[in-house]
Amino acid sequence: MKTHSFDAFCRACLDALKAQRTRYVVIGGLAVTVVGEPRLTADLDVIVFADHAALRALITYATKHGFTADIETEVEAARQGESIRLDRGNFHFDLIVRSLFIEDLAYEHSRLRKLFGRMVRFPSPEDLAVLKVVAGRPRDLLDVEGIIRRHGPDLNRRYVEATLEKVCELAEDHEILARWRRLIGARRR
């Protein structure tokens, strides 16, 4: 199996999104590196805003341009609300299909930044923090701590809290907001 550089891998992912005119916003480790604090990653995670036909076209295009995936399996995963995984060399391209209003906000507030010789769409620090707090995994919460450290008083904490309150109301689960408050409290000590 031929090994690809991470830069070349990311360019191929971004080129596939552009070729298929797929709206997206980068999340995950690459977004954390750009918006928060640098960390290692071996994949590219994006939220995509596409229907099932457009997803099928994107997956088909990608498999014709160096990615491996079982098209039917990945389309079915999307129908079931799961993420789509496309592989290229040692790297993974994970597509998360838009399902929550916070993902719309992340796209709405996103900014284009030049990276890998491409214009790449990244969420605001606040929206990335919201997405990470909602995900709630230990790595995500460490990422939020890095966002808080990097942006300090410039981080719009009221926006984050108000958005998380809406998520909690919809989910009928206030642990999400409690996570955020613990992170903010830990930073004040």
Image (spheres, rainbow, N blue to C red):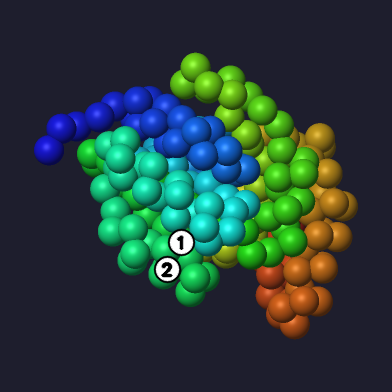
| Residue 55: assigned label | none
Instruction: For the residues labelled 2 and 1, say whether their Cβ atoms are less than 8 Å apart.
Output: yes
Residue at image mark 1: 83
Q: Residues within 10 Å of mark 1 (few under 14, many from 20)?
A: some
- In the image, 77 versus 39, the foreground residue is 77
Residue 139 in the image, given as x and y percentages of width and height: 48, 55
Q: Mark 2 points at which residue?
A: 77
Is residue 124 placed above or below 129 in the rendered structure? above
Q: Which of marks 2 and 1 is nearer the N terminus?
A: 2
Look at 77% across and 44% down and name the residue there: 108
Q: What element carries label 2?
A: helix
Q: Which residue lies furthest to the left in this view?
A: 1
Label 1 SS: loop
Q: Position of residue 112 (x, y in %)?
A: 66, 28
Task: Pick whichever, 167 or 50, lies toward us.
Answer: 50
Q: Is residue 167 above or below residue 171?
A: above
Name the kind of residue labelled 1 in the image. Ser
Q: Residue furthest top?
A: 117
Q: Is residue 31 something one can see in this rendering? A: no
What percent of the width, then of the height, locates residue 160? 79, 54
Within the image, what quadrant is residue 75 found in? bottom left
Residue 131 locus on image (x, y percent): 64, 56
Would you place residue 67 above or below residue 78 in this image?
above
Disc 2/disc 1 C-alpha distance (Å): 6 Å
Q: Is residue 163 visible?
A: yes
